[in-house]
Image (cartoon, rainbow, N blue to C red):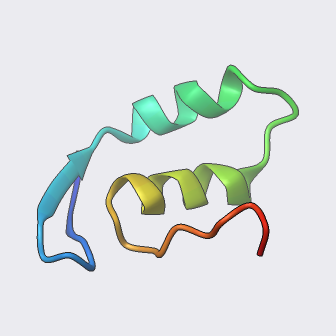
Amino acid sequence: MIEATGRDGVTRRIDPADVVRKEFSSPPIEITRMLAGAELTLRLASQVDAGE
């Protein structure tokens, strides 16, 4: 488990195996997308609109 406190002050946990499993279900596999997904789940990064 990875535990982190997000930008909103809430502490969240994520299982790295879940992140990898999700990425492998959507080929082609992109490591940066995998890391970005984990950051968004833990709320460590701001979510960007599709228009930006």
Position of the N terminus by quadrant: top left
Q: Residue furthest right?
A: 28
Q: Is residue 37 above or below residue 15?
A: below
The residue under the point 42% across, 30% down is 18
Q: Position of residue 22 (x, y in %)?
A: 57, 28
Number of numbered discs on residues: 0
Residue 7 in the figure: left or right of residue 21? left
Q: Residue furthest top?
A: 25
- Give the quarter of the image for residue 6: bottom left
Q: Position of residue 8 (x, y in %)?
A: 20, 75
Q: Position of residue 12 (x, y in %)?
A: 17, 55
Q: Nearer the viewer, residue 39 or 9?
A: 9
- Give the quarter of the image for residue 11: bottom left
Residue 45 in the figure: left or right of residue 51? left
Residue 29 in the figure: left or right of residue 19? right
The residue under the point 77% across, 75% down is 52
Q: Nearer the viewer, residue 22 or 46?
A: 46
Q: Position of residue 37 (x, y in %)?
A: 54, 52
Q: Is residue 25 above or below residue 15?
A: above
The residue under the point 37% across, 72% down is 44
